[in-house]
Image (tube, helix red, strand yellow):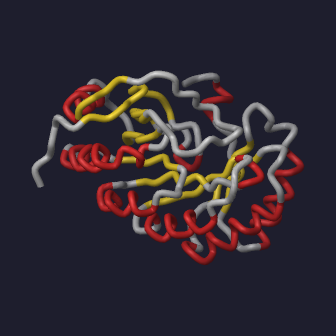
Amino acid sequence: MTLCRDMKAKVSEVFKSIQGEGPYQGRPQVFVRFFGCNLKCRFCDTQLISHEVKTISDLLEDICKYSNYHSVSLTGGEPLLQLGFLKELVVSLKKKSINTYLETNGILADNLLEIIDNIDIIAMDFKLPSSTGMGGFWLEHKEFLKIARKTNVFIKAVITAETVKEDILKAAQIIKEASADTLFVLQPQNPYEDELAEKLRSFSYVCANEGLRFKVMAQMHKVLGIK
């Protein structure tokens, strides 16, 4: 496969920090934040207002400025929207023996299928309608998870004051049908962790009763006040 180093994408920022969410909390990563998203969740804490247009070569140069990190987090926005560029980027990273960590809203299954062989870890969001304020993506999440389970995947769902038990039960059923052993992370909306304690306790009982592997995990980078 000949790579097109002149292919371009909209990138908001590239920086090194620690992963603040899920089971890889505390791991140093290089974050590549892609511009643009196909959803508008009411709890979204990533407001992207600017970007640069970068080639594959530009981005590899940015990434290679850093050292001593666990993986490159491809985040956003929604990285899978810029599929052609992402497809070539992950091949380039694989050739350099750099681990790839895809952070995604978990609904673009066909796009994931195009790159799954070169993705090492997937952090898949489960967009609960009572949390997001949008309609449900139950079927999209199910199809996405069936593909994502081919590599190392975990699921996280943001828990807000509006999140309802019925959505947790529905998510549990889909996880059990599509990939029963996948870790399900309940992530309280920051900075409302204390107010959500009782709800998180209740949802933990639901997950336990459904036989899921699950954890309740706050956003470490928000607690520590770092990027």
Residue 115 horizontal/vertical position (percent): 32, 57
Q: Nearer the viewer, residue 53 or 60?
A: 53
Q: Is residue 15 visible?
A: no
Q: Is residue 33 above or below residue 211?
A: above
Q: Is residue 114 left or right of residue 79?
A: left
Furthest residue toward bottom: 177
What's the residue at 76%, 62% (across, down)? 167
What's the residue at 78%, 44% (across, down)? 160
Q: Is residue 141 above or below residue 190?
A: below
Q: Is residue 124 visible?
A: yes
Q: Is residue 92 above or below residue 44?
A: below
Image quarter hosting the C terminus: top right
Q: Is residue 207 left or right of residue 97?
A: right
Q: Is residue 185 above or below residue 68?
A: below
Image quarter hosting the N terminus: bottom left
Q: Nearer the viewer, residue 140 or 217?
A: 140
Furthest residue toward left: 2
Residue 172 horizontal/vertical position (percent): 69, 68
Res 226 → quadrant: top right
What's the residue at 69%, 73% (across, down)? 173
Q: Nearer the viewer, residue 129 or 70?
A: 129
What's the residue at 28%, 28% (across, down)? 54
Res 16 → quadrant: top left
Q: Is residue 201 left or right of residue 86?
A: right
Residue 140 horizontal/vertical position (percent): 55, 64
Residue 122 horizontal/vertical position (percent): 46, 54
Total labels: the figure holds: 0
